[in-house]
Image (tube, rainbow, N blue to C red):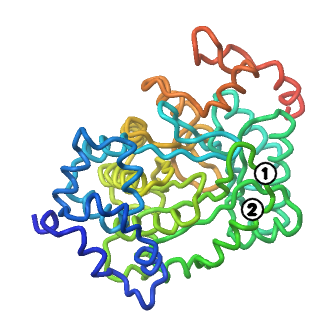
Amino acid sequence: MALAELPLRIFLNETLAPYETDEVTRLIIDEHDAAAFATISHLTVGDFRNWLLGDDVDSATLSAVAPGITPEMAAAVSKIMRNQDLILVAKKCRVVTAFRNTIGLAGRLSTRLQPNHPTDDATGIAASLLDGLVYGSGDAVFGINPATDNVPQVVNLVTMMADIIARYEIPTQSCVLTHVTNTIAAIERGAPVDLVFQSIAGTEAANRSFGIDLALLAEARDAALSLGRGTVGDNVMYFETGQGSALSAGAHHGMDQQTCEARAYAVARKFKPLLLNTVVGFIGPEYLYDGKQIIRAGLEDHFCAKLLGLPMGCDVCYTNHAEADQNDMDNLLTLLATAGCSFVMGIPGSDDIMLNYQTTSFHDALYARRVLGSRPAPEFEDWLHRMQIFSTEPQFRLNDGLPPTFRDALRRLS
């Protein structure tokens, strides 16, 4: 009740990390859109919840108000909402981004094809890419977490994925999830970089622990834009977050981890990403103890990011020492897909053999699309039909057997 009675204006006047010493706070305050905020400026946190749930508030209204909502306002209202409230409001938010295809349209659910390999073996990565593509995965991004994290390896992996995308004319984008400085160096060496990746957090000190600041992210975005590799849009950034990162760095300024998480979305919003996702259960049970907490955190993160106008996806995941299992992940995947999540992960067998955690598989993504009638990004969907991966009648069924175009690829891999 105490939280519900707080006026929203208080979050503009009382900062949770000092304005003078925290550049994320300065970003939030200095770039706040007062005109967009005017619609809700008279509300308390409780009134804001009621307003969000009202039938008169639609996608267009939420898009117009988003620049006036601070992360602290979003986090506050999420704390007095039930799971169904978080789902209902997030479903009304519509955030669309584009690079070589269009992510976030109504009735669509995209996937990141994550072909990680413990030794970055090219054949193993290619096999996982082929596996994912024949299940209709990969429209959000081909995203590799490199086992060997250095600039030459980044160049090798980026070039390999660019060659595959070009050979099969796949309307998607690739990314090596390395430190932003490595990606800048790869661009300087002429690598065909599509998206720039970086993990981000909600305070200046936490971002410093990642070796980044806002100026470095701006430099990276400018470098990627200079390549002009997008065909239908120019959203070139990919960010990952997760509750607990500021706390584990001792950089949370006494804030709870969900409020710190929401503040990371202010950093993301500044750089207009194609993709943003929370790796919700990756840090471990020291931060999110069990399946129930992971599910709640995933819904909170998705709601807050969508409310702030961001293309939010989720790595629906857990570590093996958490009190969670794959049934919990099935539940969270279903809830997030219902809430309009932009994308989820697709990994062979739902088991990441490089990072050693449990997430969602190509089959899991197909399940969510089947149950909710969701489809891939439109450009990618057209490609799936052209490649005879998806059938036309009945729509969106997988064709039997390997598509003809991929038979030579399979022979080369074997």
Coordinates of residue 22 in the picture (x, y in percent) = 45, 85
Q: Secondary structure at mark 2?
A: helix
Coordinates of residue 231 in the picture (x, y in percent) = 75, 44
Of 215 and 153, nearer the camera is: 215
Identify the mark at residue 194; answer none if there is no mark: none
Viewer can see residue 128: no
User: Within 10 angstroms of label 2, few (less than 14), some, or many (20 or more) residues?
Assistant: many
Coordinates of residue 292 in the picture (x, y in percent) = 29, 50
Image quarter where the C terminus lies is: top right
Q: Secondary structure at mark 1?
A: loop
280 lies left or right of 55: right
Viewer can see residue 20: yes
Q: Residue at x 82, y 62 (%)?
A: 153
Image quarter where the N terminus lies is: bottom left
Count of residue discs: 2
Q: Could you tell me the amino acid type at mark 1? A: Arg
Task: Work out whether 328 lies above or below 307.
Answer: above
Mark 1 vs 2: CB contact within 8 A: yes
**Residue identifier under label 2:** 224
Q: Residue at x 66, y 45 (%)?
A: 141
Q: Residue at x 65, y 14 (%)?
A: 391
18 lies left or right of 132: left
Coordinates of residue 123 in the picture (x, y in percent) = 82, 43
Q: Residue at x 61, y 8 (%)?
A: 393
Q: Could you tell me the amino acid type at mark 2? A: Ala
Task: Work out whether 120 lies above or below 8.
Answer: above
**In whole angstroms, how far apart are the C-alphas of marks 1 and 2?**
8 Å
**Residue identifier under label 1:** 229
Task: Work out whether 132 lies above or below 385.
Answer: below
Please identify the quarter of the rendering in which residue 330 is found. top left
Of labels 1 and 2, earlier in sequence is 2
184 lies left or right of 279: right
